[in-house]
Amino acid sequence: MSNLAIEVNDLSYKYSQSSIETLHKVSLKVPFNTISLLVGSNGSGKTTLLKILGGKNLCLNGDLKLDGENPFSSGFRNTVSLDDGTEINRVCYFGTDWVRSEFINRDITVLELITSLGYKRDDKNNEFTKRGDYLMEILEVKLDWRMHMLSDGQKRRVQLIMGLLKPFKILLLDEITIDLDVVARYKLFEFLKYEVNRGKTDPQRKCCIIYCTHIFDGLNSFYDRVLHLHRGELVGDFSRNKINYVDDENQTNSCPNNDGVINVMHSYSLHPLILKWLLKDEKSF
Ligand SMILES: Nc1ncnc2c1ncn2[C@@H]1O[C@H](COP(=O)(O)OP(=O)(O)OP(=O)(O)O)[C@@H](O)[C@H]1O
């Protein structure tokens, strides 16, 4: 059985209102048990690609397989059950537009929202409850929060809990940690890494993540691979284990050498210090 989570061949996409293609002949293979970063300038096509993979934008061009099946085929089902009966999502897309949707901007509590997705407050052994409680702890969300009274950042935290309540096979995250503080973001990445690592020993839990971002602080040990989109074309693709950190700007290069190694200058960031401070603050709270 294929270990590919995502397989895309020659995918092109043009919005009906646009005269040019937003994606041009994109081909991509993403194995399970990996985390990829999707990078590129504003307008390069990242959201468009993730929305197609997430089944949000219908695309009948090119050859597309997610978890072994075309997500736009009539027989595609987005949930499957594991041997123990746990229901999991095959493909999950979270984008920034969710916080503006009418569905969540109602006078409804977090408890009501996540209960409708399988959270059971009185059943602490239930997997969705365990995940929900853990995520609420790291994201500091309260069950009695009322959605229509929350800030965008707070709504984003609720979105993450709702989306991650069920285990996933393919998780597509589109700039969604943008308004989390460094500690919440760090803990979320630890949770996501745990999920991906669990799949390495338990084949039923194999999963993969594509994470699109413009913020690279704190990501050093999170990802396995970087995908670079430029004007709708995939122009760069390298693995973290092929990075050779150098101290001299003149030794950096933008393309891998013949052995696939790419020289990247060490970046000096305040992120490790601020993370330490805020984790310490939390302990003394
Ligand atoms: N609904 C739409 N109709 C027409 N063109 C669109 C539509 N949505 C996006 N585009 C265009 O497609 C191109 C890619 O947009 P997309 O949102 O995928 O880029 P992005 O890489 O995610 O950018 P950003 O980093 O700013 O979020 C842009 O030129 C954009 O104007």
Image (tube, rainbow, N blue to C red):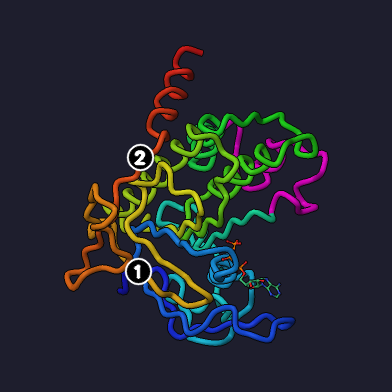
Residue 40: x %, y % from top left? 49, 64
Determine the secondary structure under disc 1.
Answer: strand
Query: Callout 2, which amino acid?
Result: Tyr
Residue 111: within the magenta? yes
Q: Which residue is mark 1?
A: 237
Compared across the picture, whether 23 is left or right of 284 comes to right
Please identify the quarter of the rendering in which residue 217 is found.
top left
Residue 112: within the magenta? yes
| Mark 1 and mark 2 residues within 8 Å of each other at the beta carbon | no
Compared across the picture, whether 174 is left or right of 81 comes to right
Residue 221: x %, y % from top left? 32, 45
Query: Callout 1, which amino acid?
Result: Asp
Above-or-below relation of 195 to 187: below
> Number of marks in the image?
2
Compared across the picture, whether 33 is left or right of 145 comes to left
Residue 211: x %, y % from top left? 47, 56
Q: Which residue is mark 2?
A: 268
Residue 244: x %, y % from top left? 21, 55
Judged from this view, the residue extending furthest toward the top is: 284
Compared across the picture, whether 170 is left or right of 20 comes to left
Other residues around mark 1 within 10 Å, as few (<14) / some (14–19) / many (≥20): some
Ligand 1 neighbours mark 2 (CB distance < 8 Å): no
Task: Tell me where the magenta segment starts and ends, as one range.
Answer: 98-122
Above-or-below relation of 188 to 245: above
